[in-house]
Image (cartoon, rainbow, N blue to C red):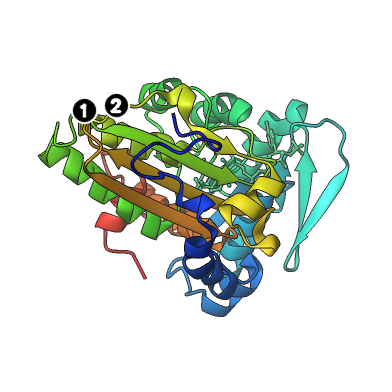
Amino acid sequence: MLSLRAPPRTFSPSPWRRRGRLDGFAAPRCVSAAPPATTLETATARPAGVSFPILVNGCTGKMGVSVAEAATSRGLHLVPVSFSSRENLDKTIQIGDVDVEIYGPSAREDVLSSVIDEFPDVVVVDYTAPNSVNSNAELYCKLGVPFVMGTTGGDQQLLYKSVQDSNNYALISPQMGKQVVAFLAAMETIAEQFPGAFSGYRLEVLESHQAGKLDTSGTAKAVIACFEKLGAVFDMDRMVKIRDPEQQLYMVGVPEEHIEGHAFHLYHLTSPDDSVSFEFQHNVCGRSIYAEGSVDAAVFLYKKVQSMDPKRIYDMIDVLQEGDMW
Ligand SMILES: NC(=O)C1=CN([C@@H]2O[C@H](COP(=O)(O)OP(=O)(O)OC[C@H]3O[C@@H](n4cnc5c(N)ncnc54)[C@H](OP(=O)(O)O)[C@@H]3O)[C@@H](O)[C@H]2O)C=CC1
Ligand SMILES: O=C(O)C1=N[C@H](C(=O)O)C[C@H](O)C1
């Protein structure tokens, strides 16, 4: 196991502990490359090229707000409605000049039906919580509204089944950051082409996210599935999940200003005789990479619905393959 206290004999698979290296590697890049989400989005946003109504579910949360802001700055029409797990919240959230009204669970079906009547070509983007993934997807499928599922967790098999059975359109991805998706796509290609190439290698994984993250990194799970196809051995119970801000600051090296919004991932592979090791990292500060990717995903899905594309269920690799990457 990758222990935070006792690094293995030959290699330390935890470069996050080697402060010198991280000080000069991951952390400073984040400091300079990740201004607050809204600024980056506003400064670099391209127009979406098309305009359509977009409803962002989860606007009481951090990703919901970031996606809603990115959508408006890309010229999409933000539907002034979102949902919460709480009843009678009586709350509006201001996104640009749009006041988004928040409805509780008992109103969501009626409200969403009215939205669909008023905006028949609406696309929903979901950034809520792992325990609402399946019930939200059921509702979108029941009402036939296309959706982008950015929320991780839940029962993923059931999620895909709901979409398949309803013949709805959906784009599902635990990772909307296009550059990270490109890494994941490369991993999937390698796994496909060279199954067993890392046979017997031990895999150790660390992921660090803001303390409020409820589930294990969905991205890490997807990358681990590729390493397993390559033959590496991994016990999911031994994943090192870091949610403690102190550890994130002093061990992982997350810049202080990103403690409340970061996603650091480290994968370390060691050969059976300890003579060879590999290490991969993707470290994200802030949320703009996901917000922009989510808007691209919504645009992609909207176009697929309009062209009545027969595939109907997509992921972010499909978006990249369409060449929509900047
Ligand atoms: N695919 C990707 O690239 C990324 C995925 N994520 C995932 O997105 C999800 C949200 O992340 P984040 O915004 O940081 O989390 P937050 O906790 O900030 O926000 C989640 C929000 O969801 C709301 N919520 C919970 N249940 C429901 C429900 N049934 N209906 C509507 N709203 C609900 C909560 O508000 P309330 O209390 O009002 O209900 C909360 O404000 C997580 O699963 C995370 O892993 C995050 C980043 C990138
Ligand atoms: O909750 C987050 O923040 C993130 N969640 C996604 C995941 O679980 O993989 C993507 C990224 O890690 C940020």
- The quadrant of the picture occupied by the N terminus is top left
Q: Amino acid at mark 1?
A: Gly
Q: How far apart are labels 1 and 2 at the CA level? A: 6 Å
Looking at this view, is 216 or 154 the one in front? Answer: 216
Q: Give the residue drawn at x 14%, y 36%.
A: 197
Q: Give the residue drawn at x 52%, y 77%.
A: 44
Q: Amino acid at mark 2?
A: Val
Looking at this view, is 268 or 282 the one in front? Answer: 268
> For residue 127, which numbered disc appears in the image?
none
Name, please, the residue furthest toward the front. Answer: 9
Name, please, the residue furthest toward the bottom. Answer: 43
Q: Is residue 147 left or right of residue 182?
A: right
Q: Secondary structure at mark 2?
A: loop
What percent of the width, then of the height, locates residue 181?
36, 52
Q: Image height check: is 176 above or below 2? A: below
> Circle 1: is it few (<14), some (14-19), or many (20+) Cα within 10 Å?
some
What residue is disc 2 on? 233
What residue is disc 1 on? 200
Q: Secondary structure at mark 1?
A: loop
Q: Give the residue drawn at x 57%, y 79%.
A: 43
- Between disc 1 and disc 2, whose residue precedes? 1
What percent of the width, then of the height, locates residue 86?
80, 32
Residue 234's quadrant in the figure? top left
> Circle 2: is it few (<14), some (14-19), or many (20+) Cα within 10 Å?
some
